[in-house]
Image (cartoon, coloured by chain):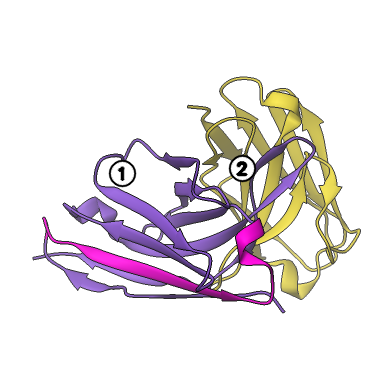
């Protein structure tokens, strides 16, 4: 099983700032099959990114994904009020697994 | 509009059984792989099981193998999860999720239901 470790656990930022979230895999992710999801309290997760850097339908371009192999990054440029949430990475190159999440909170 | 609506959750004693259902609409259900994903209270996400469009291929997480059974009825546009021998650690919100296959891989989840709470406690 591929274990995904996300850091930091919590990111305290102000609206307009840039958020940088990290996801590290215990072994190389096949074909960089790495996705990111956003989850707000009481809601289901929403797919943001896939294939490490492709935005899902309807996702604004302030969300940017990068990385390959075992190290992946999600950057949110210019945080909007609706971006404060928990973010999960997920690999789908093998039996799917998720990271433990990074909470982006308002400073 | 794609809709997935789970039902059948509730409180059950350890060792008991429960059957979850997921009613879908707004897409051609019979063409999609479907999944169950769960989230323990205050915790992260865990993939539970997936089933191919024709039910030919079925996969389970090790944590539920031998206890849970996924199935589907394409005529009713519905997905099911039969959960037996339930344990306290199965307590979670269970989500029905549609699979999105791209670039040669699947197990990507592009549409989710609102989730249903299953509580296993005496």
Circles 1, 2 touching at the beta carbon (< 8 Å):
no
What residue sits right under mark 2 in the picture?
A90
Provide residue A82's location: percent of width, then percent of height: 73, 73
- The purple chain is B
Q: Secondary structure at mark 1?
A: loop
Q: Residue at x 52, y 34 (%)?
A: A95
Label 2 CA crowd tier, 10 Å (few <14, some 14–19, many 20+): many
Q: Which residue is mark 1?
A: B64
Give the yellow chain's letter. Answer: A
User: Measured from the top left, where is residue A78 in percent x and y?
Assistant: 87, 62
Say left or right for B18 vs A66: left
- Which chain is mark 2 on? A
Whether residue A104 appears in this view of the structure is: no
Q: Secondary structure at mark 2?
A: strand
Left-right relation of A38 to A59: left
Q: Position of residue B39 (x, y in %)?
A: 42, 58
Q: Are marks 1 and 2 on the same chain?
A: no
Residue A61 to residue A88: above or below: below
Q: Residue at x 47, y 52 (%)?
A: B44
Q: Residues within 10 Å of mark 1 (few under 14, many from 20)?
A: some
Nearest the eye: B75 or A43: B75
Residue extending farthest top = A27
User: Is residue A10 at all visible to an observer of this figure?
Assistant: yes
Q: Mark on residue B28? A: none
Label 1 or label 2, whichever lies nearer to me, is 1
Which image quadrant: the N terminus of chain B? bottom right
Q: Is residue B18 magenta?
A: yes
Q: Is residue A64 on the magenta stretch?
A: no
**The numbered mark 1 sits on a residue in which chain?**
B
In which quadrant is the C terminus of chain B drawn?
A: bottom left
State which region is magenta. B14-31
Side of B52 where A89 appears, left or right: right
């Amino acid at each position: 099983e591929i274990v995904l470790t996300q850091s930091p656990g919590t990111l305290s930022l102000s609206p307009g700032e840039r958020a940088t979230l990290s996801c590290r895999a215990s072994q190389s992710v096949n074909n960089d099959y790495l996705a990111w999801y956003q989850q707000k309290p009481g809601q289901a997760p929403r797919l943001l990114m896939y294939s490490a850097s492709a935005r899902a339908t309807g996702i604004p371009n302030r969300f940017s994904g990068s990385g390959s192999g075992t190290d992946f990054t999600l950057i949110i440029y210019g945080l909007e009020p609706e971006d404060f949430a928990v973010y999960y990475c997920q690999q789908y190159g093998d039996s799917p697994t998720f990271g433990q999440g990074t909470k982006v909170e308002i400073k | 509009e794609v809709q997935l609506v789970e039902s059948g959750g509730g409180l059950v004693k350890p060792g008991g059984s429960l059957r979850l259902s997921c009613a879908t609409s707004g897409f051609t259900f019979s063409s999609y792989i479907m999944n169950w994903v769960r989230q323990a209270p205050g915790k992260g996400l865990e993939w539970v099981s997936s089933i191919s469009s024709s039910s030919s291929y079925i996969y389970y997480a090790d944590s539920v193998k031998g206890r849970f059974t996924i199935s589907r009825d394409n005529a009713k546009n519905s997905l099911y999860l039969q959960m037996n021998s339930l344990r306290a650690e199965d307590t979670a919100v269970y989500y029905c999720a549609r699979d999105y296959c791209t670039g040669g891989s699947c197990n990507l989840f592009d549409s989710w239901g609102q989730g249903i709470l299953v509580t296993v406690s005496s």
